[in-house]
Amino acid sequence: MRYRTDYSAALLASPPAVIDIAGWRLHYQAYSTRQRDSRPPVLMLGGAFQSFRSFAAEVDELLAEHPVILLDLPSQGGNLQLAPELGLEQLADLIAAFAEQLQLPPLMPIGLSYGSALAALFAARHPQRCARLLLAGITAFGRPGARRMLEEGLALLDEGRNGEFAQGALSGLLNPLQLQETGVSPVFRKALLRQIQRLSPIEVERYRQNSRRLLAFDGFSQHPPCPTLVLAGEHDHFTQPWEHAHFAAACAQADCVLIHHADHLAQFERREACAALYRPFLGGRALPARSPGSTRLQAEHLLKLEKRCEPRLAPRQRQAQLQHAEGWQWTVELSELGFFGGLLQGDLPGDLPMRGWRLQCADLPSQPVLPLRCDDQGLAFVFPHTDAEASQALAARIHPAPLPTAACA
C-alpha cells in the first residue's frame, strides 16, 4: 500500500482510488504521514447517507498516530455499483479480499451504523486480519420495531412517497425528543431531511438493497474475538443502548460505553467524548477509568440494561379510534402511550393488515401506526413518524415541555 501524505479535508471530495475484486469495484482513499507504513491502519466504514467527507474531523485527528483508509464497498457511500446478490457476509469478505490484495497489516475498523454490521462481520469472519474493532450504532436488527420501520420505509419508497420516507428516516437517526440534550441544530436537521428527500433514483435503489441486506441478516453466529469498543448514544432509539450492550457481552474482549447527550449519531454529536475513548483504544492503551461525557458499563451490567427507551404511561384519555385506509374502524382503549409506540385493547380481528393504519386519540391529529403483535395483552404498535405535523403534536403531548417546530420539521 502506498499512502498519500498530503491529506487535507478538500481531498475527501476528490475521485477515489478504485480496486477491482472479482468484478466488484471498491473505492478507497488512504492517508498517512509516510508513504510506506507498516502500522495497523484505521479503516473507516460509514453508514447510510454518509460519504468520505463525513469523516474529515476523524481523519485529521487519527492521522497523528495511525494510517487511515476510507473504504466504500459496492452500494455504499460514493460507490454507485449495485450489488443486490451480495449479503452482509459477502460484503464483509470483500473487506478481507481488499486487505489481502493490498497486502495490508491487520486492520482497525471503525464501523458506524450500517458500517458497524460490516465491520463486526469482517472481524468475526476474518480474525487474523483484524487487530482492533470500534463500533457505534451496532445491531443485528432482530428487534421487531426496528425491522418494521425498515420495512415501512421500503414500502413507502416503492409507492413513491419519498417525503414520508424521509421524515421517518430522519426521526430514526435523530431522536426528536432529545434535540436539546443532543444539541442537534435545526439547520443540521433540515439539511439532513433535504438530503434524504432528494435521493437520486440510484441512491434510492442502493438504500433498498442495503436495507434488504439488514432484514435478511439472521444475526451473528460468531462474534469478534479481537479487542472491541462499542459506543452507544444514551438516547439512541433506533439501535438502542441495550442492543449495544448485548453485542458487547457476546464478544470475547469488549467494552461498552454510553455516550451522554447523544443518539444514533454519537460520533458526530459528541466528538470529543468519543475521541477521548477511541484515541487510547486504537493506540492499544487502557481506557480511562473515568472519561468526561461517557459512562463505561461494567461487565455484570451488560445484560441488565432497560430495553424500553422511553416510559410508556397510561394516557389521560384512553378511548381512541383505530382506522384503516380501507374504511374499517374500531373503538379501542389505550393502556400505554409513548412517542415511539404504545399498547391498545379492542375487539380486533386476528389477521390485521400490516399497513394502512392510523390512530385517532383525544384531540391529537391522526397518527400513522404500524402493528407489531396482537396477543392477550393487546395490540402493540410503533409510530413510524412519517407525518411531521402529527409527530410534532404527539411530541408536545408526551414531552414535559413542547418541542420547537424544528424538532419534527
Image (tube, rainbow, N blue to C red):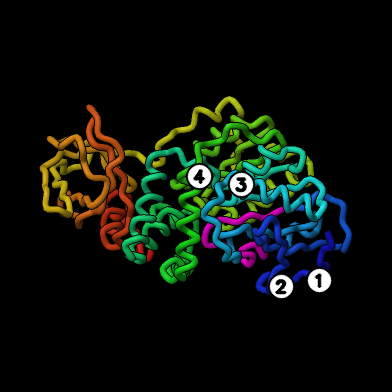
Q: Which mark is residue 11?
A: 2
Name the amino acid, label 1.
Asp
Q: Is residue 47 magenta?
A: yes
Residue type (three-letter) at the residue carrying disc 2: Leu
The crowding category of the residue bearing disc 3, from other C-alpha atoms within 10 Å (few below 14, some 14 to 19, many at least 20), is some
Query: How many residues crowd mark 4 within 10 Å: few (<14), some (14–19), many (20+)?
Result: many
* Pointer 2 or 3: first along the chain: 2
Instruction: Select label 1 or label 3 by which is in front.
Output: 3
Is the C-beta separation of discs 2 and 3 under 8 Å?
A: no
Q: Position of residue 207 (x, y in %)?
A: 48, 59
| Mark found first going from the N terminus, 2 or 4 | 2
| Quarter in which the C terminus is drawn | bottom left
Mark number for residue 6?
A: 1
Q: Secondary structure at mark 1?
A: loop
User: Which x, y percent locates residue 63?
Assistant: 78, 59
> Nearer the N terminus, badge 2 or badge 1?
1
Of labels 4 and 3, earlier in sequence is: 3
At 69% across and 32% down in the image, what residue appears?
253
Residue indicated by mark 3: 90
Name the residue type under label 4: Glu
Do tag 2 and tag 1 residues touch (Cβ < 8 Å)? yes
For the point 71% across and 73% down, which residue is it? Answer: 11
Disc number for residue 234: 4
Crowd tier of the residue under label 2, counting other residues whose Cα lies within 10 Å: few below 14, some 14–19, many 20 or above: some
